[in-house]
Amino acid sequence: MTATQWLARERAAVARPLRLAALFGIIEGLLIITQAGLIAWLVHQVVMQSALLSDLLPAAILLVAAVIARPVFQWLKVRAGLTASDQVRSGIRSRLLQRIETLGPGGLPEKNRGELASQLTDQIDALDGYFARYLPQMVIAVAVPIAIAAAAFSQDWLAAIFLVLAAPLIPLFMALVGMGAERLNRDQFTALARLSGQFLDRVRGMTTLRLFGRLDDAANGIIEGSDEYRTRSMRVLRVAFLSSAVLEFFASVAIAVIAIYVGFGLLGYIDFGPAPALTLFSGLFVLLLAPEFFQPLRTLAQHYHDRATALGAAELLMTLDDGEIAPAPEPARRQREEAERSASTLSIKHLAVQRPGRGIVLQVPELTARAGERVLIEGPSGSGKTSLLLAIADLLPDTNNAMANDFAGGRIGWLGSPTFLANASIRENIRLGAPDADDSEITAAAQAAGVSEFLDRLPDGLDTRVGERGLSLSGGQAQRVALARVLIAKAPLVILDEPTTALDAETEAHVLSAIDALASAGALVIIASHDTVLRDHADQVHVIRNGRLERTRDA
Amino acid sequence: MHDLKPYLKLLRDYRGQLGLGALLMLVTAASGIGLLALSGWFITATAVTGALLAAGIAATLNIYIPGGGIRTFAVTRTAARYFERLVNHDTVLKLLRDLRGRVFRDLATLPAAEMPRLRSGELLNRLTTDIDRLDGLFLRGLAPTLIAGISVILVMLLLMLGDLRVGLAAGAVLMALGMIMLWRAWHEGNTTTLALAQSSAELRAGVVDHLSGLAELKAFGSLQQHRQRLLCKADEAQRIDSAMNARIAAGEAIMTGGIHLMATLILFAALTLHTNGAIAGAIAVMMPLAVMALLEPLGVLPGAGWHMARARASAVRLQQDLPTKPSAAQHPTREWPQTGSNGRGAEIEMDAVSLTRGAGARVLRELCLKVQPGERLGILGASGAGKSSLAALISGQIGADSGMITINSCPVDAIDPTSMRQHIAYLTQQTDLFSTSIAGNLRIAQPNASEQAIREALEAVALDEFVRSCPAGLDTWVGESGTELSAGQRRRLALARLLLRDPSIVILDEPFSGLDSETAEHIACHLQAWSKGRTMLLLGHDREALPAADRWLVLRNGQLRLD
C-alpha cells in the first residue's frame, strides 16, 4: 500500500464531514457570486440609469443578507473540516496504540521510544491540515470556479474564456511543482527531525560536553546544523513559493486583462464578439468575479503543503500500521485462585527465543519451574536474558509452542530494567500493579517495599507526582516503588529483570526479602541478573553461555 | 508584550532584511488594493464615457495611464509577494539559527546542579517547540499587523478622495475592527495556548509512559485501563486544539463579514453621494472596491494575534527555563598547579566541606579528606549519600557552601576551568552519548585522536570485537542518544572516551554499572595500567563493583569513615 492509498482509506472513514465542509464552501462561493451580481447591478442602476438607491431597497437588503450569510458559511466550512480531522486523528491514534500493544515490548525493533511517541503525537497531528483544509478545498476548488465561470459566461463569453483559459494551466503547473515539492518536503521532514535530535542530545549531554571542554564546539555545531537546515529549507520554499506565485500571477493578470478588455469594450473600441453588448453591470460583475475565480485555487495552493506533510507523516505511520485492524484487545489478566496457583508449572523444552529483526537470540533446551520456586538466570549483558523473560511473560510475538506455561494469561508481576515509573503519583504507580486495589492495600504494599520510609520527605506523600513531569526519585527510591507495584499485584508469576543493579544496601535488602516472601507465598519468581548476591536467594540457577541456557545448580 | 523584549532585540540584528521584507509585504498589499480599486474606477469611467460617446456627446478619457497602472499593479503584486516570502523566510530561519545557538549557550551557563532537571525529555521538547514558535513572532505576528495598519490608512486616503467624512469614518471603523479582532485573538490566545501546551505535554508524557511501560502494563493487566486514560488525554488535547482553530476561524469569518459589510455601506454612501452629484460614478465604484481589497491584509489579523500570543507564551517559558543573567562571577585564571617531580598524580584535600542541596537537605557536613598524589581511593555509599556531589565538588562543577577544597594546595575555585578540564577526567554516573558515529563519540574526549588510539581504547573496554562486527566499523552511527547500543555497551563507550585523555585526576562514578563481572574485570585490568601514577577516585556502593583501590572509605551521613 502506498501512502496515498493509506490516506484514501482514512478519508473514506470521514466522508460525511468532508462532504459537508465542501458543501458549505460551495454555498459560500454561490453567495460570493450573488454579492458580486448585486453590487454590479446596483452600481449600474444608480450610475448609468440614474436610479435612486432608495428605490432599489429590495436589492440592497438582499446584498446585505448575502454579505452576512457569507462568513457564516465560511465558518461552518471550517468547523466541518475540523470535525473530519478530529475523527480521523483519534481513530488512527487508538488503532496505532492497539497495534503497538499487540506487537508488545519485544516486537518493536530498532525503534526508540522517542520516535514512536512522536509518531503517536506529532505525526498524527501532521495529518490535520490535509483533512481539515486540503480535502474540502479540493472539491471547492473545482466546483466554485466552474460556477463562477458559468456566471461570467452568462454575461460575456469572451471574458469567461479569459478565465477558463488560465484555469487548466493551474492544476497542470501545480502537479508539476507538487511532484518535486513532495520529495523535498520529505527530506525537509527528516532534516528537521535530525536537527532537533542533535540539539536535544547536545543539551542532554551538556555535563559531559562541559567536562571535556567541548561546549563551544557543540554550540557551533548546533548553529552550523541550523544553517544547513536553512539552506535546505530555502530550496524547498523557493519551489513552493514559485507555484503560488504562478497562481497569483494568473489571478492578477486575469483581473488586469478583464479590466482592460471591459474598459475598451465599454468605450466601443472593440467591435467583435460580445464586446459591443457590454454594460457597466456585466463588466463590473465579471471584474468582481475574476479574483474570486482564482481564490479557491490559491487557497488550495496554500494548503498544498498540507498534502505533502500528510504524505510524509502517512509514510511514517504506515510502517506501524500494517493495515489490518489489530485483534480485539486482550482480556484483562485475571487473578488466579489460590489452589490453582500452587499447582502451576512452567515447562520449556527446546525453545528458540526470537526477536524481530535480530533472529534467534537464545536457545533454551530445558527449563522447568514450579510455583513457589526462585529461578535465577545469569549471563553477560546482551546475552538475551531480557528476551527470555519477555518470552516467559508471553510478551514476545510468535513464540513457538515449546512452552507449557500454566501462568500464561494470568497477571504477572514485572520489574523491568530500567525501572519504569509512569508520569503519575506514587499511588497511581503502585496501583498499576493491581488496577482495582484500594488505598489500604496500596499503603500496605508501600510499607512492605520500603516506600513508606521516604514518603514523609515528599511534599504530598503517596500523592507526590513522579517521573519526568514530577519529582525525580533516586534509583533506589524508584526501585522501591516498582517493587511495591509487584507486591500489590499478588501475581502467581513474578519476573524481575536486574532487580538489584545500582541499588543501595537498604533497597537491596528490601528487594531480596521481597523475593523470598513472594516465593514462600507461592509465586514462581524468575530473576535475570548478573549480581551474585542473588545466588543465595535462588532455588535454581541457570547461566547463559554461547547463546544457550544451561542449568548450573539446585539449591 | 515585554516578555518578548529579548527576542525583539534579537530582531534588531536583522533590521535591514526585516525592513526589506516588510516593505515587500506593503508593496504586495498596496498593489492588491490598487489593482482592484483602479480596475473598478477604470471600467466605470469607460462605461460613462462610452455612454456619452454613444449619445454623440464629445468626451475623452485618458486610457493609457490607468491601463498601464493596472498592468503594473498586476505584475508588482505577484513579484513583490514572491520575493517577500523568500526574504522573510530566510530571515526567520536565520533568527531560528541564532536563537538555537543562544539558547544552547544560555543553557551552558546554568549551574551544574540544574543539569539533572535539563535531562528531562519534556523540558527539552518544550525548548525546541518554543524556539520554533518564536519564529511566528515577526513573520506571522508583527509584520502582518503593521501592514494591515498601513493598508487601512492607504484605503482611508483613497476614500477621502471621494468624501472626507466617509473616508475618516470608514478608516476609524476599519482600524477599530482590526484592533478589536487582533486584541481578541491575542487575549484568547494567551489563555488557550497555556491550556494547549499543558494538555499536549500531558498527552506526550502519557504516550511515552504507555510505550516505555508496555511490558509492565501488559504483565500486570493494566494495559486497557492505561490506554483508556491515555485516550482521554488525547481527546482533551484535541478538543482544546479544535476549539482554538474554531475560534481563529470565527475571527476570520467576523473579519470577512465586517469588511464586506463596510464595503457595502461605503457602496450605499458612495452611490448616494453620486446621486447628489458630489462625486463621479467612477469614484463611487472605486471606493467600495478599495475596501473589499482590504480583505487580504486584514483577514490575517486574527491569526496574527494568535501567533503573537503563542510566541509570547514560548518566550515566557524559555525565560523560566533559562537563567535570566549568566552568573557574572569572576573568571578564575590560575593555571593547573603542577605537582613536584613525583609523577602525574595530584594531591586533593578537602577541609570541613559542607554542602546543602534542595530544600535544606545536608548532603555533606564538615567533610574532611586527603588524597595523596597517585593514590587510588574508593568511596562507597548508598545511592543518594552524596558521592556524585563529592565528585562534582572536586571537579569544580559545583561550589561548596563552606569549607575548602584544594588540588596541590591550590583552591579549586581559583583554577581556570579550561586548565582544570584538561587535568581531571570524570566519568559521570549518567552515560551521555551523542547521535554521531562511534568514533565521533570518542573524539568528543580528544578531537584529534588517531584511529590507532581509538582502537586501543575500544579494545581496553572490550568493544573492539563488537565494532568489528558492525559493517560500518568505527563509523557506526550511535542512534538518537545512542539507543541502538545496550546499556553496558554505552557504559563501555563512555569509559573508552576517558582512556583517550591524559589526566592527573580520574574520577569514576559507578564505572561498571550494567556490566557483567567478566567484562568489568577485563576493563579493570586495562584501567589499572592506564591509571598508573594518576590520582584516582572510585565511587560506588560496593567494592566488588569497582576496580581495586589502595584505601576504602564509606560516605554516610555526609561524612567519610574508614570502611
Image (spheres, coloured by chain):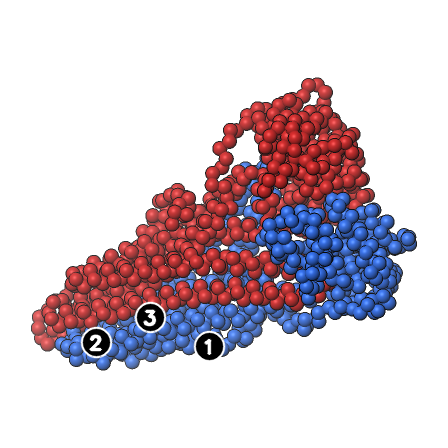
Amino acid type, mark 1: Arg
Q: Give me the chain that's red.
A: B
Dot 2: element: helix
Classed neighbour count for the residue bearing mark 2: other residues with Cα under 10 Å, few (<14), some (14–19), many (≥20): many
The Cα atoms of the two marked residues, 3 and 1, are separated by 22 Å
Q: Which mark identifies residue A292?
A: 3
Based on the displayed image, in which of its 4 quarters is residue B206 positioned? bottom right
**Quick one: label 2 or label 1, which is nearer the N terminus?**
1
The hue in which chain A appears in the rendered picture of the protein:
blue
Q: Residue furthest left?
A: B57
- Which residue is located at x 25 percent, y 64 percent? B290
Task: Identify whether B20 is placed above or below B404.
Answer: below
Q: Which residue is mark 1?
A: A19
Give yes or no for contact between labels 3 and 2 (Cβ–Cβ under 8 Å): no
Task: Identify whether A130 is placed above or below B448.
Answer: below
The chain that hosts pointer 2 is: A
Amino acid type, mark 3: Glu
Q: Which residue is mark 2?
A: A42
Amino acid type, mark 2: Leu
**Quick one: label 3 or label 1, which is nearer the N terminus?**
1
Does residue A527 appear left or right of residue A62 in this picture?
Answer: right
Q: Is residue A278 visible?
A: no
- Which residue is located at x 34 percent, y 49 percent? B20
The Cα atoms of the two marked residues, 3 and 2, are separated by 19 Å
- Which residue is located at x 80 percent, y 66 percent? A407
